[in-house]
Image: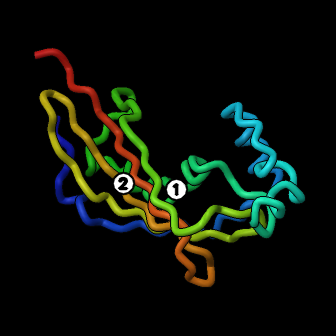
């Protein structure tokens, strides 16, 4: 069944800022198997030119869909989570995510399209600090797999 195209362009802010901590960065780096010391050691991060430890490039996936979560679960959209697989994610950075950041994320359903029997839904999220400094833009595509004909 086709997803509701009326959702394209709808924007969803996250309810609260996401507080980035050294612990969360370290846990994420461990989960993805990245041993880079700039994700764990403040001195290594400072030696690399950062004010504190920074997060691995894919870290914003932790919070970037939070604002769109209610929209994705809205029955009017018609998304069947039992048929969803992750299709793609991309990140465009203005600057790295740093320990101590308080980040806001505004997500927009930027595209819904059909490819064969599948529905592809793309969410674009703008990540900024609470002061309004741009940090990154994330692009996440979910695929709702179609059934057999």
Q: Residue furthest top?
A: 148
Residue nearest the observer in this picture, 60 or 41: 41
Q: Which residue is label 1 attached to?
A: 64
At a point 57% along the width and 70% down the height, the residue shown is 104
Total labels drawn = 2
Hey, which quadrant is residue 115 in on the image?
top left
Q: Quadrant of the C terminus?
A: top left
Position of residue 77 relative to residue 47, above or below, is: above
| Residue 66 appears left or right of 32 | left
Residue farthest to the bottom, as pictured: 131
Q: How is the image coloured?
A: rainbow
Look at the numbered discs 2 and 1 and tell me whether their residues touch, using CB distance below 8 Å.
yes
Q: Residues within 10 Å of mark 2 (few under 14, many from 20)?
A: many
Horizontal and vertical percent for residue 108?
35, 63
Q: Earlier in the sequence, mark 2 or mark 1?
A: 1
Residue 75 left/right relative to 126: left
* In the depicted structure, whether residue 137 falls above or below residue 33: below
Left or right placement of residue 126 versus residue 101 in this view: left
Look at 80% across and 58% down and name the residue there: 45
Q: Residues within 10 Å of mark 1 (few under 14, many from 20)?
A: many
- Helix, strand or loop at label 1? It is loop
- Residue 42: x percent and y percent? 87, 58
Residue 52 position, x and y percent, is 80, 64
Cα gap from disc 2 to disc 1, whole angstroms: 9 Å
Question: From the image, which quarter does the N terminus lie in?
Answer: top left
Task: Return the residue at label 2.
Answer: 123
Question: Which numbered marker is on residue 83?
Answer: none
Above or below, comparing residue 110 to residue 82 in the picture: below
84 on left or right of 146: right
Instruction: Identify the secondary structure beneath mark 2.
Output: strand
């Amino acid at each position: 069944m086709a997803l509701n195209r009326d959702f394209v362009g709808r924007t969803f802010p996250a309810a609260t800022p996401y507080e980035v901590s050294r612990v969360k960065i370290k846990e994420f780096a461990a989960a993805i198997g990245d041993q880079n010391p700039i994700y764990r050691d403040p001195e290594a991060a400072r030696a690399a030119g950062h004010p504190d430890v920074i997060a691995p490039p894919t870290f914003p996936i932790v919070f970037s869909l939070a604002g769109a979560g209610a929209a994705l679960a809205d029955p009017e959209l018609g998304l069947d989570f039992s048929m969803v697989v992750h299709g793609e994610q991309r990140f465009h950075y203005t600057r790295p995510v740093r320990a101590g950041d308080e980040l806001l994320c505004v997500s927009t359903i930027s595209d819904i399209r059909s490819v064969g029997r599948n529905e592809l839904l793309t969410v674009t999220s703008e990540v900024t600090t609470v002061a309004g400094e741009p940090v990154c833009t994330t692009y996440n595509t979910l695929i709702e797999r179609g059934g057999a004909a």
